[in-house]
Every structure is written in C-alpha cells, then in structure tokens.
Amino acid sequence: MASRYEKEDSKRRILSACVQLFIEKGYQKTTTVEILKKAGVTPSTFYNIYHTKGSILTELTEFMFGNQFDIAAQLLQDPDILQFHQRYRCFHHF
C-alpha cells in the first residue's frame, strides 16, 4: 500500500501533467495513456486517485475558482477596495 506521501506526490504529478497536456492539446484530445506517461504513474495508481479524466478536470476547476473566490473575499475586506467600491459602485453584485 502506498504511503500518504507517495499518494500526494503521484496526485501532484498527475495534476501537473494534466495542466501541461490540457494546455498543449486540449482536454478532449488528451488521453489517459498520455497522462499516465507524462506523470510517470501506473494505471492502478491513477485510478486509485482519480476514477476518470473528468474528475481531474473537476478538481482543477474547483481549485482555480476556489482561489479566485478567496482572492475576491480578501479584496472585499481591504478598506481601500471597499472605499473604492462605495465611491464608484463598480462591484454591483457584491
């Protein structure tokens, strides 16, 4: 059984490989075999972490949007940003 460190390292390599491949080839044209090869993991390791290629895309999307929402929340707590918002009403949805 793989240690937690090995699993996290494999997950990081898979995500890194996917980002590179998705940018280079696009999501649809990237195959699971290419991901395995670029990440240097076995099919069993891949499927123990991610059940499908789509689950990787979901995790990447959640990570990216999660960071954006965190940044927006931090900006809204900044007094200078709040003053700008009150003055110019540029953030109508907040």
Image: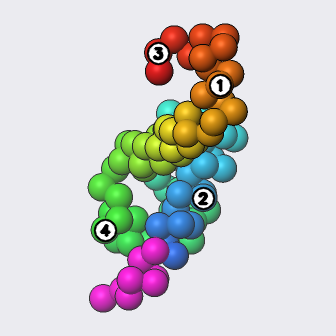
Badge 4 vs badge 3, beta-carbon distance below 8 Å: no
Residue type highlighted by circle 4: Asn
Is label 2 in a helix, a strand or a loop?
helix
Residue 14 drawn at (x, y percent): 52, 62
Badge 2 vs badge 4, beta-carbon distance below 8 Å: no
Label 4 belongs to which residue?
A: 48
Residue 25 lies in what quarter of the image?
top right
C-alpha gap between disc 4 and disc 1: 49 Å
C-alpha gap between disc 3 and disc 2: 34 Å
Q: Foreground mark, 3 or 2?
A: 3
Is label 3 in a helix, a strand or a loop?
loop
The answer to which of marks 1 and 2 sits earlier in the sequence is: 2
The answer to which of marks 2 and 4 sits earlier in the sequence is: 2
Disc 2 crowd rating (10 Å Cα; few below 14, some 14-19, many 20+) is some
Badge 3 vs badge 1, beta-carbon distance below 8 Å: no
Is label 1 in a helix, a strand or a loop?
helix
Label 1 belongs to which residue?
A: 83
Choose between 62 and 93: the one closer to the eye. Answer: 93
Q: Label for residue 55? A: none
Label 3 belongs to which residue?
A: 93
The answer to which of marks 4 and 3 sits earlier in the sequence is: 4
Q: Label for residue 16? A: 2
Residue type highlighted by circle 1: Gln
Q: Which residues are magenta?
A: 1-8
**Is residue 68 placed above or below 44 in the rendered structure?**
above
C-alpha gap between disc 4 and disc 3: 41 Å
